[in-house]
Structures are given as C-alpha cells and as structure tokens.
Amino acid sequence: MDRPAYLKGLDEYFASRYSDYVKLSAIDGYRMPDMIYVAPDGNVARRDPSEKRLCRQADAEVLLERFKAGLEDTDFTFSFRFRTLREALHDPFEKVTFKKLLPAALKRCDETAESAGRMLSVEPRFWEKIVRGKLYPEKNLVLALALTSRMQLPDVIALLTVCGFAFSSESVRDVVCEYLLAQKIFNPEMRDACLAEYHITSLPIAREGE
C-alpha cells in the first residue's frame, strides 16, 4: 500500500531541513560531500552547509529510513518552569509576554484558554497558572498547544520567542512540528501518524481516555 501523501511530504521536508550533521554523518552509507573546492576563478571556496543535508544524497530515501529506524525521543522536558525573581519583577512592565499574546492567538483559532487546556496533558491547576503568567511553558508544551489548538505558524513563532525558544533545524521534533504547522495538518490521526513516524512521544498532548 502506498504511503499517504502527507507522510511523503514530511519525509521530503525533513530531508531538506534537518541539519544535525553529526547525526546525519553517522548513518550507514551517508557520504560526506567535499565542502572545500576550487572555484572557477581558481580560488579555494567552501560549499554551503546545506550540501550536507539528506536531500543532497543520491540514496536519500534509503538513508532516511535508516535514520528513522534508530530514532528515539530525547526532547523530554517538564511542561512548565517557575519564573525567576527577575522575570516576576519585570513581567508587569513587558509589552509582550506569553500571557499577553496567548488570548489573541487562541481567538484566531476559535479556542479559549479553557478549551485549549483540555487538549493538553497538563494538570488544570498548572495550566491555569501558565495562562495567568505565574508559570512559564516549556517548549514541548508550546508545540503541543499549537498542534492541538490548530494555531497559525506566525502565532506559534511569536509564543516560542517570548518564552525564549525558536524552531531548530537540528531538532527532529522541531522540524516535524514545523512541517505540521506550516502544512496545517491538524487532523489528530494524521498528526499522530507524523509524530509516530519520527518517534516523537514527549509532547504533552491529551489522549482519549486520559
């Protein structure tokens, strides 16, 4: 049976974006390209690092399957962290914080803080404190919130930024989540299939029966 188009699209996206070259170079059969070469003008030049990505390999599909076979989720974090004293003192005067950005971001995807919280695997008492700005969400929670609430990518980037995070092309989790958000793949079955394809298990998404 042919693989679904959204999984094929994810593989193509991942092969063109993922940039942890230490892990890529460890794949059996991966061929490190010559990064230094003599340019037509006779000068020694260096190729762009993107030449080392999987999409540049002749047998990219085979190498990607080998890479996925050895994956395990190492991006576990707690869902939140406590504010430092400095943050607690400065937050009231900051124009942009997670607490201030969240309502508008949720409104654009027809959700409220209450409805969004029900889709997350985080205790209600802690979610309430996150919404009120008493606790700061960790990256895993922001990504889970974005995927379950069907957020727009610019809003996700803004929320990550105020929490001190950004999408990283060296993170399997980040590349997969960025693909899902950019392609607006929010159907739970499709979303979970993409996460499972790359062995991403640490996102605090509430599952049926929890």
Image (tube, rainbow, N blue to C red):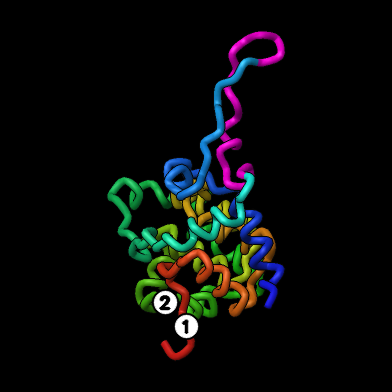
Q: Are marks 1 and 2 in contact (CB under 8 Å)?
A: yes
Q: Position of residue 199 (x, y in %)?
A: 46, 67
Using residue 197 as the reference point, say whether residue 10 is left or right of it.
Answer: right
Task: Choose between 158 and 114: the one closer to the eye.
Answer: 158
**Does the magenta portion include 44?**
yes
Residue 80, picture quadrant: bottom left
Q: Which residues are magenta?
A: 39-57
Number of numbered markers: 2
- Crowding around mark 2 (Cα neighbors within 10 Å: few <14, some 14 to 19, many 20+) is some
Which residue, given by chain and number where applicable, does mark 1 sit on? 207
Q: Amino acid at mark 2?
A: Ser
Q: Position of residue 8 (x, y in %)?
A: 67, 64
Using residue 117 as the reference point, say whether residue 149 is left or right of it.
Answer: right
Question: Which residue is farthest left?
Answer: 85
Using residue 33 as the reference point, say whether residue 210 is left or right of it.
Answer: left
At 57% across and 52% down in the image, what residue appears?
A: 157
